[in-house]
Image: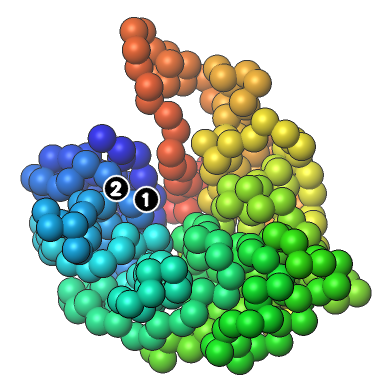
Amino acid sequence: MEYGKVSWTSKGLFFADKDNDYWLAEGQKPKVVPSSKVDTQDTLGVLQDNITHVSVYNGGFTEDGEGYNEDIVLFDGQKAEKHRFLTDHPVSSISVCGSSVYAYQITDDGVNISKELIRFSSLIVDNHYLPRTISTHDNILSSDNVVISNPSCNNDSIVFISSQGGNSSIIKQKHNDLDYDLRRFLTAEDTKGENFSYATIEQWDAKTGNRRVLPLVDEEARPVHFHESQIGYSYYDSHSLHGDQFYWWYGDGGLLRTDVNSGKTVRLNRTHYQKDNWSRSCFWASFSDKIVDVWYHHINEPDRVTITRQDLDTGKTVNTIEVKGLEKIIHGAGDSNTIDRSFAVNPRAEKLISGQKV
């Protein structure tokens, strides 16, 4: 069984296992709500009321192998409401915009299975289960890293970092869907027809499904080459978008800032920089208005975990604390294979730590 995603809002702490949903609100008795699900939790989001949580669970292929099962569970603090979402491919990620939830899937056109498409659908609309395909786009290249982490959404504008990788010679012969100025980067002379990878920033209109994709560029507007795997191990969340600036944690262990309108990307620090031997299980980041808290499970010191708080404007470290005792839980006795898969920070933590009333 694969669980472990947790959400901590100003209203309480939410998590789930195969049989129950759990809600811990301050000053209240912990609530355990029966909620039977399939084994694997794909993703988790919270609606604007900071109580209602939407979880997506991977149910695998249907018995005839022609479809795919996803369980969608809505938890409103009192009860859990489950829906079986019958589709053709797994849900790779979700976006929460207010009281609505949208899903992304890598799919095909039903005829040519080698033609990759990205389907953008609604799952929840105004707190009600309402699955509907909104738009479908050509996958620009061949990478399946459409959405790496949980996108941010402001005023129905969804923003996230994605990875595009493929062969530049093939790019010239496809993509009728390119209504953005991206082709010149994807077919640049320095690629010489070889396989390559670019990181991109995407904007989607939640209402229409319209999509804009820009390459990440440096201050001279030249495309920035990122390591494909390190892009895949990057992290951002629903609080990463501040105005037209998008903050994200790169897979090599550092904080970056990308301008949504130009793609210009600036590295703010290399706090936990590691050239090799990194893993997604090492880093988790939780963003807020002014700071990012980074959970770092040191890969070369498996019993060591630190939480580093950094200022988003400057990238400077505010403080670092050591998390004690986790080795007994994670590595435990016997054949324990528990790993850390999620990290959430109380949004009132700054005030609580300083002793202020909240």
All told, the count of numbered labels is: 2
Q: Where is 30 relative to 56, above or below?
A: above
Residue located 79% across and 55% down the image: 268
Residue located 47% across and 16% down the image: 327
Corner quadrant of residue 31: top left
Is residue 287 visible in the rendered image? The answer is yes
| Amino acid residing under circle 1 | Ser
Residue located 11% across and 54% down the image: 63
Q: Which residue is mark 1?
A: 7
Left/right of residue 3 with respect to residue 186 in the rendered view: left
Residue located 59% across and 82% down the image: 174
Residue nearest the viewer, comparing 90 with 356: 90
Q: Are marks 2 and 1 in contact (CB under 8 Å)?
A: no
Give me the disc on residue 41. Answer: 2
Give the CA separation, mark 2 to mark 1. Answer: 13 Å
**x and y percent of residue 14 in the render?**
29, 48
Left/right of residue 96 with respect to residue 290 in the rendered view: left
Residue nearest the viewer, comparing 20 with 132: 132
**x and y percent of residue 267 in the render?**
79, 57
Display coloring: rainbow
